[in-house]
Image (cartoon, rainbow, N blue to C red):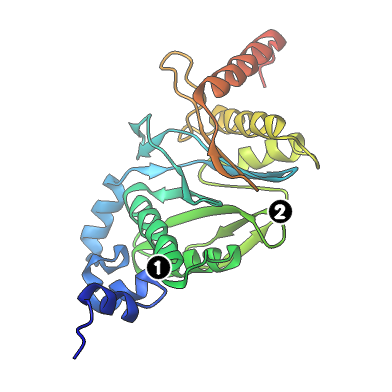
Amino acid sequence: MTHQDPASAVNGAAPPSFSDHLARHHPELLPSARRLGPASATAASAAAPQATTIVALTYAGGVLMAGDRRATMGNMIASRHIKKVFPADNYSVVGIAGTAGLAIDMIRLFQVELEHYDKIEGTPMSLDGKSNRLAAMVRSNLPLALQGLAVVPLFAGYDTERHLGRLFSYDVTGGRYEEYEHHSVGSGSVFARGALKKLWKPGLDEESAVAVAVESLYDAADDDSATGGPDLVRQLWPVVYVVNSAGAREIPERELHMMAQELVNRRSAAGLEG
């Protein structure tokens, strides 16, 4: 009589979706399992730090995502150091806007979801599959979103089958929309999108794409108090990731420092009020 290793039995029975596996055995651990009464939700919404602003754009050979470092709580700055853009796996990144704590939990679960699928199926999930799994997670948070604790991500990655960078936006109901050229979410998104429309052009190289992202966040911070621009005093710069056929890579701070300094010098030399 043979005895099967318990770990092998669990792995063999595990579904490709880690979220489904967790929902079946430990649903209380899912971020969407939280339930608040109306009074608690109102208090939590007012006290929870909010993360903004995220921009994403395509360039020749890939896609880029960048986020500022500020989180707000009402009219107060809750943090100047928050990170809003994360690698989801080797070929995709995800940015967050909305309730910071819930969003970070969702991203951690999404990262595990993709790694779990890779190990169970023996192959990475397709980019469309990843974007759809993230949509399901956003949809599961709808009860909290309706109470003011919304999470609105922005997802981007390199499609290894189609050999191009793609990006996707979402609404609080889990609606998934493929965006083209560029997009932005968060409180400063309207100003960032205006800048992207003027600065983006087809065939941008990677360095130019990073410069466009940094300048669009600078413009957003100029008009939106919840968005933090490059901070030359505290040496704080946006978090920027590029994703191409070589995978996801974070742009070093020294490069962002040089770009931000050049931008500030150029704007100062122009001496324009607007």
Query: First in sequence: mark 1 or mark 2?
Result: 1
Rendered view: 210 above or below 120: above
**Residue 110 position by quadrant:** bottom left
Would residue 81 be visible to someone looking at this image? Answer: yes
Rendered view: 58 above or below 206: below
Would residue 149 be visible to someone looking at this image? Answer: no
In the rendered structure, the answer to whether residue 4 lies left or right of residue 62 reads: left
Tell me if mark 1 has few (under 14), some (14-19) or many (20+) residues whose alpha carbon lies within 10 angstroms of its own. some
Tell me the residue at 65%/58% (across/down).
Answer: 160
The Cα atoms of the two marked residues, 1 and 2, are separated by 31 Å
Front disc: 1 or 2: 2
Q: Which residue is mark 1?
A: 142
* Residue 257 percent location from the top left of the image: 54, 19
The kind of residue tagged 2 is Leu
Most extreme residue toward the top is 269
Q: Nearer the viewer, residue 29 or 32?
A: 29
> Which quadrant would the N terminus be assigned to in this image?
bottom left
Rendered view: 181 above or below 78: below
Tell me the residue at 36%/70% (across/down).
Answer: 19
In the rendered structure, the answer to whether residue 11 lies left or right of residue 266 reads: left
**Mark linked to residue 83:** none
* Residue 138 percent location from the top left of the image: 44, 64
Q: Which residue is mark 2?
A: 164
Tell me the residue at 47%/20% (across/down).
Answer: 231
* Residue 27 percent location from the top left of the image: 25, 73
In the rendered structure, the answer to whether residue 73 lies left or right of residue 272 reads: left
